[in-house]
Image (spheres, rainbow, N blue to C red):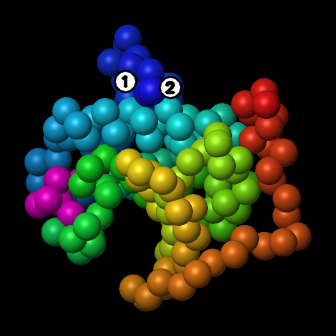
Amino acid sequence: MTRVRDDGRPGEYFTWSEMQTTSTGLPNVALKSSRHNLRRLCHVVLDPLRRIVGPVRVNSGYRSLAVNTAVGGSRTSVHMRGLAADIVALSSAWPAERVATLLAQSPRELIPFDQVILYSSGFVHVGLVEGTPRRQLLYSSGGRYAAWKPPEDEDLSHLWTDASGL
């Protein structure tokens, strides 16, 4: 169950403003069910990730239907349910491929992501699902998607153990 914070924030490191940000100028306020999902996204993915990589910018979290349409999002985008975020770590030590690798190497029981997409433009999409996560890893360039595998020469899995105390 997702812990509801008593300070009104969706996560330890994230605000509602960050999780609902849009550059479209359109209204983008999450409904109650989507706010619950955004809390879960922060609690199980973004906050633990932030403890490892430092500050993270959310390029896109929740999207209303109008915002999703304006940005060319998928008709079935989980952003519209508050179950995804497109993120960039602000530290130069954590480029997008390394963040995607870290997420890919996370323990299944700790970070139950459904999808991680590494975008050639330098950000990472991480999505949850309400059912059983697929742990799908994709790479996107020019609107095309392909299966992606993290580099085998970098093992970051121990960082999750260090961060979670497992």
Give the structural element (helix, strand or loop) at label 2. Answer: loop
Pinpoint residue 96: horizontal percent, then vertical percent: 61, 64
Seen from this angle, which residue lies furthest top? 6
Query: Left or right of 157: which side holds 153?
Result: right
Tell me the crowding category of disc 2: few under 14, some 14 to 19, or many 20 or more residues within 10 angstroms, Cα based: some
Q: Which mark is residue 12?
A: 2
Whole-percent x, y for residue 76 in the image = 25, 67
The amino acid type, in three-letter code, at marker 1 is: Arg
Q: Which quarter of the figure has residue 127?
A: bottom left
Residue 48: % across, % down: 61, 36
Amino acid at circle 2: Glu
150 sits to left or right of 31? right
How packed mark 1 is, by other alpha carbons closer than 10 Å (few <14, some 14-19, many 20 or more), is some
Q: Are marks 1 and 2 in contact (CB under 8 Å)?
A: yes
* Element type where label 1 sits in the image: loop
Q: Is residue 90 visible?
A: no
Nearest the eye: 101 or 106: 106
Establish if 155 lies above or below 45: below
Q: Which residue is mark 1?
A: 9
The segment highlighted magenta reads 62-68
Q: Is residue 164 left or right of residue 15?
A: right
- Say which quadrant the C terminus sits in: top right
Tell me the residue at 32%/58% (across/down). Answer: 78
Residue 68 seen from this side:
yes
Asked if the stretch drawn in magenta spans residue 24, the answer is: no
Q: Residue at x 17, y 47 (%)?
A: 28
